[in-house]
Structure formats: C-alpha cells, structure tokens
Amino acid sequence: MRGVAKHERRWGSDNLTGNTFSDASSPATEEYVEVTLDFKDDDTIILRSVEPAGAFDIESDTTKSGYLTPASVSRSPTLIRSTSNRILQFSQELKAEAVAKAKQISRRFSWGHGKAFSSSQNGAGSGFDLALAARALRRQRAELDRTKSGAQKALRGLRFISNRKGVDGWSQVENNFEKFAKDGFLQRSDFAQCIGMKDSKEFALEMFDALNRRRRLKLDKINKEELYEFWSQITDESFDSRLQIFFDMVDKNEDGRIGEEEVKEIIELSASANKLARLKEQAEEYASLIMEELDPEELGYIELWQLETLLLQKDTYLNYSQALSYTSQALSQNLQGLRRRSPIQRWSTKAIYFVEENWKRIWLFVLWIGVMAGLFTWKWIQYKNRAAFQVMGYCLLVAKGGAETLKLNMAIILFPVCRNTITWFRSTKLAQIFPFDDNINIHKSIAAAIVIGIILHAGDHLVCDFPRLIRSSPDAYRMYLAADFGSKKPTYNQIMQDLEPLTGVIMVILMAISFTLATTWFRRSKLPKPFNKLTGFNAFWYSHHLFVIVYALLIVHGLYLYLEHVWYQKTTWMYIAVPVLLYAGERTLRFFRSGFYSVPLRKVAIYPGKVLTLQVSKPSQFRYKSGQYMFVQCPAVSPFEWHPFSITSAPGDDYLSVHIRQLGDWTNELRRVFEQVCEAPESGKSGLLRVDESTTKSLPKLLIDGPYGAPAQDYRKYDVLLLVGQGIGATPFISIVKDLLNNLFKAEENDGNKGRKSLKTTNAYFYWVTREQGSFDWFKGVMNEVAELDNKGVIELHNYLTSVYEEGDARSTLITMVQALNHAKNGVDIVSGTKVRTHFGRPKWRKVYSRLRSKHPNATIGVFYCGAAILAKELNKQCYEFNQKDSTRFEFHKEHF
C-alpha cells in the first residue's frame, strides 16, 4: 500500500558523514532534489526515485511516458518538511549516493527517454553532475524493476553454448582437448573448434581473450585446468556471470565502460559470425543507435547495468510480427492429447487416420493393382493351355503375364503428365475422388511397375524361354513350337535377330537410359567433365524424350509376335492408342498456344541468392488461379526446353511474374543471357542488375505456356491457411498472399452487397524459412504491402533466417537488441529491410500448430508446403498428431513439379 505518492524534501546545507556534498551552499544557491518514497504498513520506506528538482518535472513527464525525463522548469520546488529524523537521515544518504556513487562503475540499469544533459566538463560542473545523477537514478530504477523472472528470461537470451539434453558437454570438450592439444596445451587458434564453435571462430577468440583478461593474463595457450575454468564460466547458469563475459568481450581496454567504437566492433563480430554482410556494413549506424538509446545523457559510454537492462527489456520492443497468442484453451486441449492409450488403440487410431488422409490414393492404388493382377492371371491361364507351355513351361506364363501388365502401364503412364487435362479435371467433381495432386508420384509409381514388368517379361524370355526352346528335342519342337517359330529350330542368335526380340532389346536399353538419368542422384549430382552432361535437368529432359522412339518400337514389337497370329489378338496398339493420341494432342496444343504467348518483357531483376525475376505482360486469354504454375521457354537459351515455375503475381495483376533460382544448366544460362542486357539498379533499389520497359537494348524472346494446376490453387476451400515455403519454395504462396490481400479490399468494398459470395478463408499464416539474408529482397514489396494494408491482421508473415544462430544464442544476442531498437524507432527490420520481423533459427512447428489450433477451434486448416522433403515429413507428422486431439483439422499438401 502506497501511503504517499510523492514526497519532496529540501537538500539544504546538510553535513554528511563521510560524504560531504555541498556544505557551503547559501540559500540563494541551494540545490534541491525531488524524492519519491513509498511508505509501507510495516513502517518501512522504499525509495522510488531521486532527481534534481530544477531539471525534472515529475508530475507531467511521468504521467505522459512512464519515465522521468528532463524538462525546463521555471517553478520553485515545493518543500515538504518532515519532523521524522528517519526520513531526514535517509534523504541525506540518498543525496550522497545520487552523485558520489554515480561516478563509480555500475552494473545494472534501465534506459529512459528524454533530452540529453550536457556532458561537457569544460563548462559548468553542475551539468555533468546532473547527467551523472540522472544516470544513477536510472540505475536505481533498474534495480527496482529487475525481477527474478525477467533475469531468467534474459538468461535464455545470453547462451554461449547450446546445451543438448543427454549430452555431457565437458566430456566432448575434454575429448577435443586431447585431440588438439600439443604438449598439454591448447593453442588459442584451436579454442573455437575445441568448445564446438568452429563456425564462429572470431567470436570464440574474442571470448578467449576476454576470459584471459579477467585473469589479468595474455596467453596464447592454456592447459586442461584452465580450459575447464573457461568452460565453467561459459556455461555458468548465472545471468550476471554470462553478462559479465559478454561485457568483457566488448570492453577490451578494461575501463568498465563501452564506447561507440567498441559497440561497433562487437556488432561487426556478431554480423560476421551470423553471415550478415549487410549488417556488418551498417555496424556504425547501429552502434550509434544503441548509444543514442542507452546514453541519453551523452556521457559517451555505457556500462554493464545498461547492457543488462537492454537484455531484460528487449522483448517489449519485439511486439511486431509476434507469434500467435497461446491461451489456456490451448493448454487444456493439449492435456486432452496426453491421455494414455493402449497399443491397440494407438494402432487403430493411426490406421483410421491413414485411411482418412489417403483414401483417394488407396482406392486408386488398389484398383490399379487389381487390374494388373487380373491381366496377369488372364494371360497365365490363357498360355497355360497353349502348346508352347509344354516346352517353355512356367517361364512363358510369367513372361506373358508381365507383358500384359507392361501394355497397361505403358498406356496409363502418359495420363499423369497430360497437364492440361489434369488442370481441367481439377475444376470438376472428379477432383473429389481422384488424387490429382499426386500426378508426379503416380507417374513414378507406374514407372517402377514398368521396370518390374520388363524384368518379368524380357528377363524370362532371354534367360528362360529362349534357352528352353534351343534345348528342346526335335520331336518336341516339331510338335509344340514349329507352327510359331518355323519348321527349322533356330539358334539363340537367330532368334535375337528377329524383329520382336530386337525391338524389345532396343526398348529396354532406351528405357534404362531414361529411367537412370531421371533418378534423384543423377538429377542432383555433378560429375566432372565430360561426364557432367549426364547429370542435371537437361540430361533428364532430353533422355525422357526417347519415349517417342520407345512407343514407335512398342507398336512394331506388338505387331510381330511369335505366338499370336490373328490381328485382333495383337492388343498392344489398343492399349496405347488413346493415351498416345491424348498426349500428342496436349503437346500440339502447347506448341500452338505458346506461339500466341510470345510475351513482351516488362521488367527483369537479378537478386542476391542467384534469383532472376521476370515480369511480362499478361495475355488477355491467360486466366489463372493463385498457386498455379506455367512453363517458360527462352529460345536464346534452348529452342526445345520448357521449364515450370510458380506464378508469383496475383490473378488481379495486369502482368505475370516468376522468380527463377539458378540451380542447373538452363537456369544458369538464362541468367547469363539476361545479365548482358540488364543495367545497374537505381539508387535505393534492390537487385544487382535490372531492366524495364524503358531500356533501349534488344531483349531476349520469352515464350510461356499455361497455366497448370497445383495443390496450392485449392486454398480457398479452407477456413485457415498455413503456408510454409523453404527458400525459393515461397513462390507459390506469394501469389496467394497477394490474392488474399486483394480480396480483403474487395470484401470491404462489397460489404453491403449481400449477393456477393464471401471468401471462406479468414486467416493466413505464411512462414518463410531461408538461409540467405538476400532472399528477403525477392518479395520485399509484398511484405511491406501486407504490413501496411492488412489492418485487420488477416495475414501474418513470419520470416525465419537459419544462417543466424537462433534467438537466445550469445552470438546473435546483440543482433536481436539492434533489431528490437531499430524497429521500435524506424519501423524496419534490420535483417529483411521490411516491416516484417525476422526470427532467427527455425520455427518450432509444434508450437505453431498448437497456437493455430488454439486460435481457430473447429476450423479446417490447409497446410501447404513447398520445399525439401525432410520438412514435409515433419509438417505431415504434426498434422497427424494434432488431428487426434480435437475437432480442428489440419490437411497437408505438398507441391510437386
């Protein structure tokens, strides 16, 4: 209970024991201070503030900002005299501490805001004393404000070593010491690798020097005992200890003060450790920002206690782009998921979920396997009653059964790559029962079945059927095989020279080449010259077009069969006729349509991270949905190759745009072609090189074909969206974000129009995870637009930079401080250059899902992902786990190209 809100007492010419402040002051020159005290019921007094009365207006400034700030005051202070000797004695002690103790090195503080005092020591001494008094006051307030929970929170933000559960850190360090030590001593240059900071060697060496300075030593090597002492200090659980180490790293001259130049050096060191080249270039600017915030008195230095308060209070500045609120409802929902279940219940739950999530794939797969099994059985029974079975035996049955499945699979393998047809089917009711999103995976599965069919058919013929024929007796041959192979029994070489086996062997060779070069290893690997032509997308693309020869040979192969002589029993052409015609029609449509879509370029920009963005005029007949993609061809690079890229513009834009990352031969050559016509960017604009409609240079011709359907185009059927992109995988979701933003304005404009159908999607959460700072330049305009225009908070953007040590690591602590201060002052994130906060490290996906479920109970949440397969597994796993807990549903979709 506060008895008196504010007490003011005159500091007269009091004589202070041991600390004389102003015992010669006359009434005309008396100095006054304002003291704020709390009187408690237990007869104790707590100091709240001490300020020179002539320089502070407590009533007005405290009311406005919550802090005590300097003000020009003309009034005389009100003097409240107390008969309490206890208050008098206490006030005398406070007066002495306000100035005398302020000159000593301090350890804790809390920054305030206000006009700076003059720190010039050449002028009146009172100005410098007032500055010191103000800083002492801020230190006292910081000591009062510091709480145990705040210190624990700050401790998590100042961690030198990442401690993993179940791992004995010192044991690993000790093993490293034995590995790197020479004659029982560890060299300074090996310290970083020894303690597990080899990727931050400069930072570790600064820490090594700081720990040495604390021992008043300057050594280039240490023994194991000294290493253990260093390790103990680094891993100390005390906040004060860790803070002191960090302060000592900056305070190289050991004067207990940090100047602006020293702040600049530690910013550069942190930026270097986190691979933030731009931040390193702007270190001087951000050092000035820190000094401006922490040194309002303009004394030219900051102390340990000021650094501490920055750690304790930085979270109050990080209120932009915060994660979703975590409510008690989420906690109760999580507790429901902790109920113990028996193994049978867990197994049945997983089985039911698997069926619910994959029923489209399951029924199609079962149907496909069933048809193949039926065809195989049919041929097995048919040929078991043939005369040839008496000589060739069951090898013939397996070969013919495999042949029939090959006919089926060589036919249906074309359907998943008929992209125009699939795109059209997506908009029909067939999309409710067919897994069109898995067309590429289905294509790969059928290819695997073709490999098995080839082994069964060609393998049995070559190593079993034909050898049995050659070894058969003349009587058996004449009775069972002469009608099919001729009156004279052929040799093995004569059989292989016939048209049927010859075309079969050629097809096997061509398909082996195509299948091999289509594997992930060959598509992603790089071999030395001249074998490099066998890897990459080009090898895959050109080898896949061998299928034209394969299908021509397949028709010939099916017409010259040894054991079939009636034309209508030679069914190969019947299987493949419709699929081949459909695919040929698709390619013909693409050929003519792309000719009409020769589009003029509007803008080209080459960004950091090897990304080329192309913006072209949108043809009037080109209609698409957000999330779809199109094919791009540049005849200057290759007159044959078409490559798919997600459309990053929104359907409402009057242009089309794609962002292309250089990952292979074609994309690298495309960049080289456009580099020749691009110009340096204007001042203040991002991008290394760019070109627009005003350029006078001749631009390369560009052809487009599309649009084509993708999983993300169905985002409108979900209540809430969770969009996750890795690196360049953000592209399909940029269009969705822009489209949602455009629909927000349309919804507001048509708010009174009851006949207009409203958008089902209420919220979208976009998580972009990238490892390069320059990546944020790609979509800077979109992010700023969302931050400025989305006043209702419908779209949340979360950027994550994995190259920076995650929040809490000492190597990124100062960057986090600067990030917080700069956004609080300028509204711009120092890493991305946008109004969207950049988080460090990787998202905690379990927390993301939990908070979404808490905020959107009973909603259907569409999770769309584009990126590496390993994260897809994690996101899908989280969908499964959270779908077991309540009625909120997560449906996972992954982009496939």
Image: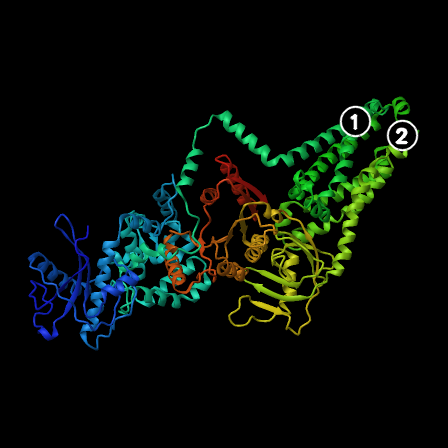
Say few, some or many: other residues with alpha carbon within 10 Å of mark 2 (under 14 / 14 to 19 / 20 or more). Answer: few
The residue at the far bottom in this view is: 123
Circle nearer the N terminus (1, 2): 1
Q: What x and y, as percent, mark residue 246?
A: 31, 56
Three-letter code, disc 2: Asp
Residue under the point 21% across and 77% down:
122
Which amino acid does the dot numbered 1 rest on?
Answer: Trp
Residue 328 found in image quarter: top left
SS at badge 2: helix
Question: How many numbered callouts?
Answer: 2
Q: Decide which of 435, 193 is in the foreground and name it.
A: 435
Q: Which residue is mark 1?
A: 378
Determine whether, in the image, residue 762 is placed left or right of residue 493: left
Q: Is residue 278 left or right of residue 43?
A: right
In the rendering, which numbered label is found on residue 484? 2
Q: Secondary structure at mark 1?
A: helix
Task: Tell me the mark number nearer the camera, choosing from 1 and 2.
Answer: 1
For the residue pair 332 and 506, the one nearer the viewer reads as: 332
The percent coordinates of residue 432 (x first, y second) are 66, 39
Badge number at residue 389: none
* 435 relative position to 683: left or right: right
